[in-house]
Image (cartoon, rainbow, N blue to C red):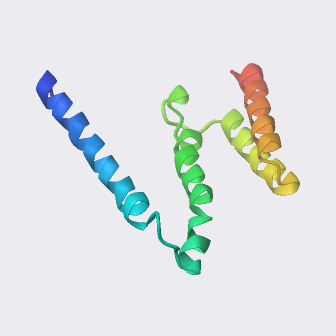
Amino acid sequence: MSYSTPHIWSIIILLGIGSFLIRFSFLGLVGGRKLPDWALRLLRYTPVAVLPGLTAPLVLFPAATGGSPDGPRMAATIVTLVVGLTTRNVLAAILSGAGTLAIGLWLFG
């Protein structure tokens, strides 16, 4: 399907307006008020919920392998998870996972 240039720009502008309105509905309308304790407690888990949603498809269906899972990525995921849970250090988990992935790809291609 081919889109014309004005059609593409109208889509970009509408998505930008929609994104702004979603953010403004929370930050602009609620930003000056104190949120209830239950809402603050739930908001603390937002990054923890978003990161697996962003990374899981990259691990389970990597584009580099045509969408099939492979050993080096699974090993890097497991190492990252174990190091993160044992040390409670995000940087150590990320670096150990990246190192495992680099070594795994170097060894197994």
Identified at 56% across, 66% down, the residue is: 43
Q: Quadrant of the N terminus?
A: top left
- At which x and y percent is residue 33? 48, 71
Where is 73 relative to 84, above or below?
A: above
Where is 73 relative to 4, above or below?
A: below
Identified at 47% across, 66% down, the residue is: 32
Q: Residue furthest right?
A: 87
Q: Is 64 left or right of 108, judged from the image as shown? A: left
Q: Is 82 left or right of 39, judged from the image as shown? A: right
Where is 14 relative to 99, above or below?
A: below
Q: Quadrant of the C terminus?
A: top right
Where is 108 relative to 35, above or below?
A: above
- At which x and y percent is residue 104? 75, 28
- At which x and y percent is residue 55? 58, 44
Along the viewing direction, whichever of 15 and 76 lies nearer the viewer = 15
Identified at 61% across, 73% down, the residue is: 41
Identified at 56% across, 60% down, the residue is: 46
